Amino acid sequence: MKASLYLHIPFCRQKCGYCDFSSFAAPGMSPGAYCDLVRAELAGTAKRFPPTRVPTVYFGGGTPSLLPPPLIGGVLQAARENYLLDVDAEITLEANPGTVTLESLAGYRDAGVNRLSVGIQSFDDRQLAHLGRIHTADQAREALALARRAGFANVGIDLMHGLPGQSLPQWEGTLRQAVALEPEHISAYGLSVEEGTPFADLAASGDLRLPDEETAAGMFEMAALFLAAAGYEQYEISNFARPGYRSRHNQVYWRRENYLGFGAGAHSFVRHPGFGLRWENPRGLDEYADRLRETGEPVAEAVSRDDAMAEFFFLGLRMLDGVDGAEFAAEFGVTADEAFPGVIGRLAAAGLLVKEGERVSLTRQGLLLANRVLVEFVRG
Ligand code: SF4
C-alpha cells in the first residue's frame, strides 16, 4: 500500500482568536511525552498496514516548530523505522515565525525536513495582533530569510484575506510583500468564522467588522490575478505554486489517496476495502493517550458509495486540473451523469463547470462560487 503520513503537533504558544484546530496553549502534557505516544502509534498502525510506501510526510498543527528538532527527528525516525519512506519523500513542517531560529531550522533540515510551510497570514502588525498571532511582520520576513540560510529550497507561506477591517488595497499590499519574499508556494485562505471560537462570539455581538461579500470575492480574484502575474500557478482554489512546487501532500487529500494520521485529532483515510475507510483520533491529549493505552486501534467507519462518489467531485474539483470522468466510471461502475443526473449539464450551462472530453473542471466563475458548486455533488 502507498499512504502519506500526517503527524499532528497540538501545541501552540497561545490560541488565535479564529482557530478551531485541535491545538492547546496549556496542554497538560509535555511535548516529549506526546511524541512518545505518536511514535508508539506509528509503530502500532504499521502493523495494520505493512509494508506501506510513503511519498509525503506532513507535520501540522498546532505549531510543530515549537518542538525542538530532536523531538521532530525522533518522530521522523519512528516513521522511517516503520514505513518505507520514498527517497525523494516530501517532508513538510509547519512553522510559526514567532518560534524559529537559524539553529532550530537547521536542526529540522538535518532531521530530514525538506519543505517548510510558514504561517504568515498578514504583514500588518495590527491585524496580526487582532488575529491573536504571536509574531510580527518583521519576524515573518526574518523567518523566510532564516529558512533560506538553513538550506530550505522549498518554502511555502500561508496568507489570509477577508480579515476584520481589511480593504482591497491592504490585501494587495499583503500579496506584494508575500511575492517579494519569493516563496515557492503560497496558500491564500479566506477567514472563516468557526463556531466556538472567540471570533464567533465577536461576530455574534456585532464586534467583528468583516469585509462584505463583494469585497471578499474581490480579494479572492485579486489573489488569483496578482499571483498569476507573479508566476504562481493557481492549482487549487486557495493554493498557488511556482512550477514544480505544488504541495504533493495536500494533493493527496484532494485526490482521495491514502493518508494515515497520527496524534490527537488526526484523521486517516484509506481507499480500500470497499469505498474506503476513515477514522479520527480523539482530540483531547488525555483521551488520545487513553485510546492508545486501551485499544491501540481506532474504530474505522466505512465510507458509503454515495459519499465516495460525492467526495470524488467535492474534493477533486477543488483542483484546477479537475476530475477525470473515466476514472470515476472505472471506480464506481456508473458514469458521473448517471450518478448525478443533470448536475454537470446544469452547472456547465450556468458557466460554472467546463467539460472537455472526459475531464470536468471549474470555470473562473465556478471557482468564485466554489462552495455553492461543490455542494451540488453532495446528495441529501
Ligand atoms: S498558531 Fe495555528 S494552530 Fe495555533 S492557535 Fe493559531 S491558528 Fe490555531
Image: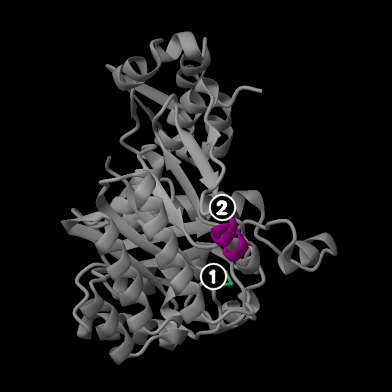
| 287 and 149: which is toward the camera | 287
The yes-or-no answer for disc 2 within 8 Å of ligand 1 is no
Q: Quadrant of the N terminus?
A: top left
Which picture quadrant has residue 327? top left
Residue 214 x, y percent position in the rendering: 61, 49
Identify residue type, mark 2: Thr
Q: Earlier in the sequence, mark 1 or mark 2?
A: 1
Determine which residue is flagged by label 2. Answer: 295
Instruction: Tell me which residue sits at (19%, 71%) in the image.
Output: 153
Determine which residue is flagged by label 1. Answer: 10
Residue 101 x, y percent position in the rendering: 35, 90
| Helix, strand or loop status at disc 2 | loop
Residue 158 visible, this angle: no
Identify residue type, mark 1: Pro
Q: Contact (CB < 8 A) between labels 1 and 2?
A: no
**Badge 2 local density, few (<14 within 10 Å), some, or many (20+)?**
few
Instruction: Tell me which residue sits at (43%, 29%) in the image.
Output: 312
What's the CA distance linking mark 1 and mark 2? 22 Å
Against 195, is 354 above or below? above
Q: Quadrant of ligand 1?
A: bottom right
Specify start and end residues of the magenta stretch as a single range.
Answer: 289-294
Q: Quadrant of the C terminus?
A: top right
| Helix, strand or loop status at disc 1 | loop
Instruction: Tell me which residue sits at (50%, 85%) in the image.
Output: 135
Residue 257 visible, this angle: yes
On screen, residue 259 versus residue 107, left or right, reads right
Residue 238 x, y percent position in the rendering: 43, 51
Against 340, is 189 above or below? below
